[in-house]
Image (cartoon, rainbow, N blue to C red):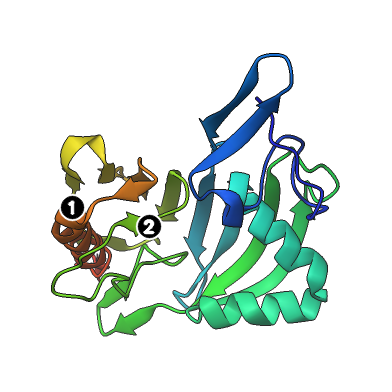
């Protein structure tokens, strides 16, 4: 079954606005009668980012950030890009990511409603160098700092609207003359009943550090009984992303 909506020029064919994901729709079939059918999103909503960073001669970072968004993430981003000037878009992006400076951005996929929108940013990031150590957060892009769930208890369900997935690949080149002193801790934890998952995996090589981060919300609605687990899930993500890379000068 396709649900047609003509109120948004950015919507892919057969998709409905998020505001319509509120339960069931009535299917009218004049031969077979009418019936209720759950309104589901046709396209998967996901975000994938790839960040490549190297240290410059002053031990600050420069590199390339590639971000691809599909589904409702992509729809929101396409509207945001189309409705703003390039300077205004970059100002808003840098306000949200105050730890990075954007040198330039290139965008693909704006003209195809069914394609992912892909942004490629050239960026610069300051590190914290003190004597013989350098410290930097690997979670430069889209770090989670505030838990959206603040109540002690909740008496009604949590409606995310749609499932979503976020994947990050992060690569740091270790500068000459330095070695790793400490890294964030690898973690993996899940919500009950396959409701969601978070994983942080780290691979250290001679000259580079690779991070793989994956976060997923697998259901549309969570009951009030599941609220505590959602709140703790986000608390653990925030705790994981507070950790730093610390590099130390070789003796």
Q: Quadrant of the N terminus?
A: top right
Residue pushed farthest top?
31
98 with respect to 26 (left or right): left
Observer able to see residue 190: no
Give coordinates of residue 40: x percent, y percent.
54, 37
Residue 80 seen in render = yes
Residue 76, x across and y down, in percent: 65, 59
138 relative position to 60: left or right: left
Instruction: Name which quarter of the figure residue 43 lies in.
Output: top right
- Could you tell me residue 85's position as x and y percent? 83, 76
Q: Secondary structure at mark 2?
A: loop
Snapshot quadrant of residue 65: bottom right
Of 52 and 46, which appears nearest the observer? 46
**Which residue is denoted by mark 2 in the rendering?**
174
**How busy is the neighbourhood of tag 2: few (under 14 within 10 Å), some, or many (20 plus)?**
some
Mark found first going from the N terminus, 2 or 1: 2
- Report the front residue among 80 and 37: 37
Say few, some or many: other residues with alpha carbon within 10 Å of mark 1 (under 14 / 14 to 19 / 20 or more): some
Please report the residue visible at 80 percent of the width from the left and 71 percent of the height from the top.
83
Spot occupied by residue 15 in the image (x, y as percentages of width and height): 68, 40
Label 1: element kind: helix
Residue at the (33%, 63%) spot, across then down: 177
Residue position for label 1: 226
Q: Which mark is residue 165?
A: none
Q: Residue furthest right?
A: 111
Q: Is residue 44 above or below residue 146?
A: above
Q: Marks 2 and 1, how far apart in space?
A: 42 Å
């Amino acid at each position: 079954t396709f649900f047609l909506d003509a109120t948004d020029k950015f919507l892919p064919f057969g998709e409905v606005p998020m505001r319509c994901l509120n339960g069931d729709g009535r299917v009218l079939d004049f031969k077979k009668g009418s019936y209720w059918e759950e309104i589901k999103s046709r396209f998967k909503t996901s975000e994938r980012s790839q960040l490549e960073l190297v240290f410059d001669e002053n031990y600050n970072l420069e590199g390339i950030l590639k971000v691809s968004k599909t589904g409702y993430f992509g729809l929101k981003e396409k509207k945001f890009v189309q409705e703003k000037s390039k300077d205004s878009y970059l100002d808003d992006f840098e306000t949200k990511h105050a730890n990075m400076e954007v040198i330039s951005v290139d965008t693909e996929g704006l003209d195809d409603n069914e394609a992912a929108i892909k942004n490629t940013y050239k960026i610069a990031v300051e590190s914290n160098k003190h004597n013989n150590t350098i410290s930097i957060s690997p979670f430069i892009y889209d770090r989670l700092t505030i838990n959206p769930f603040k109540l002690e208890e909740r008496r009604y369900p949590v409606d995310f609207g749609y499932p979503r997935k976020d994947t990050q690949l992060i690569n740091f080149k270790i500068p000459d003359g330095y070695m790793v002193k400490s890294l964030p801790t690898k973690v993996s934890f899940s919500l009950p009943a396959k409701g969601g998952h978070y994983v942080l995996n780290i691979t250290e090589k001679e000259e580079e550090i690779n991070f793989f981060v994956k976060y997923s919300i697998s259901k549309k609605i969570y009951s009030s009984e599941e609220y505590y687990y959602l709140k703790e899930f986000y608390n653990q993500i925030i705790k994981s992303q507070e950790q730093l890379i610390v590099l130390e000068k070789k003796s």
